[in-house]
Image (cartoon, rainbow, N blue to C red):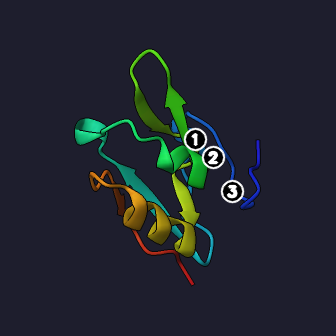
Amino acid sequence: MTNQYGTTQGSGAADIAAPASGFKEVLLSPGDCSGCGACTELAPDIVGWREGDERPFLVSDVAPDGVLTELMAFCPEGCFEGGDESCP
């Protein structure tokens, strides 16, 4: 399935590919998550919410640079980081 950013969403190892130009890998460490939900409101195509765990999860492991920057800026607990740069 393709999201609004043109990236493929999946969960298998065969789905792993280099991020498209202008995209970065998203790394999520929800251990200190306060449960504010800002990430799911800001980027619902990138971050989902597990009701039972009260924790976010990645719907897509890549995001446009600007969206990743916003996720990192708005998360009060610093749960988001950028991984590998996109390939030119």
Residue 51 locus on image (x, y percent):
49, 20
Mark 3: amino acid: Thr
Q: Is residue 10 left or right of residue 56?
A: right
What residue did someone put label 3 on? 7
Q: Residue sitting at 39 percent across and 64 percent down?
A: 72
* Residue 44: assigned label: 2
Q: Residues within 10 Å of mark 3 (few under 14, many from 20)?
A: some
* Mark 1, other Cα within 10 Å: few <14 / some 14–19 / many ≥20: some
As helix, strand or loop, the secondary structure at mark 2 comes to: loop
Label ID, residue 59 = 1
Q: Which element type, helix, strand or loop, lies under badge 3?
A: loop
3D distance between C-alphas at marks 3 and 2: 14 Å
Depth check: 57 or 34 in front? Answer: 34
Classify the position of the N terminus by image quarter. Answer: top right
Residue 83 in view: no
Q: Position of residue 33 (x, y in %)?
A: 30, 40
Name which quarter of the figure residue 14 lies in: top right
Marks 2 and 1: which is nearer the front? 2
User: Where is residue 61 shown, x and y percent of the image?
Assistant: 51, 51
Query: Which of the two residues, 1 or 31, is positioned nearer the viewer here?
Result: 31
Residue 45, numbered label? none
* Earlier sequence position, callout 3 versus callout 2: 3
What residue is shown at x 65% (from left), y 48% (from top)? 45
Q: Which residue is located at x 76 percent, y 56 percent?
A: 4
